[in-house]
Amino acid sequence: MTEELPVKFELVDINAILQTLPHRFPMLLIDRVINIRADYSGIGIKNVTFNEPAFQGHFPERPVYPGVMMIEAMAQTAGVIGIKSVEGTEKPRAVYFLTIDKCKFRKPVLPGDTIEYHMRSLGRRKTMWWFHGDAKVNGHVVAEADVGAMLTD
């Protein structure tokens, strides 16, 4: 078992996320990010509620949170981790998706669930970042993917 590195940011709340990412309703898909560590890992939190726009069509009779939105939330969490962790990138920037690899959906996510996006850095080259993410509900993995993103001005 590897030793965890120190926490650099214990909590990035919604106000700080709004200052960090350009995303806004209905496409801002995380509520907070916790425990951003020196190794560029952290956990994004999403409280899934029934009144979200996605549930109007996915699916009205049996609401299931869309998997593609979980993958986008992984990228948003990775964006917050990257921007907050590295000196000189604290100002708001655009975050663009580069890649999605090894994506798997394991279990449905329902209204009332809280999703934790456990993200850890796989690598970085200049403004490009790659992360592995495990989306968990009550400690069980519901989705996973490797995502790449690019930070721009």
Image (cartoon, rainbow, N blue to C red):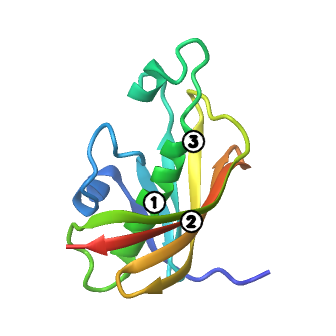
Q: Helix, strand, or loop for circle 2?
A: strand
- Mark toward the start of the polypeptide (1 vs 2): 1
Task: Report the front residue among 149 and 45.
Answer: 149
For badge 1, the amino acid type reads Ala
The one nearer the camera, 47 or 99, is 99
Position above or below: 112 against 42: above
Q: For residue 25, which numbered disc appears in the image?
A: none
Which residue shows up at 32% across the image and 37% down it?
26
Is 47 situated above or below 103? above
Q: Residues within 10 Å of mark 2 (few under 14, many from 20)?
A: many
Q: CA distance from mark 3 to mark 1?
A: 13 Å
According to the picture, the residue beneath numbered tag 1 turns out to be 75
Neighbours of disc 3 within 10 Å: few (<14), some (14-19), many (20+): some
**If the image is split into quadrants, where does the C terminus sit?**
bottom left
Disc tally is: 3
Q: Which residue is mark 3?
A: 67
Relative height, residue 105 to residue 76 (above, below) = above
Under mark 2, the amino acid is Met
User: Within 10 Å of the Cα at label 1, are there few (<14), some (14-19), or many (20+) other Cα atoms?
Assistant: many
Regarding mark 3 in the picture, which secondary structure is present there? helix
Instruction: State the residue position of label 2.
Output: 119
Q: Decide: marks 2, 3 in contact (CB < 8 A)?
A: no
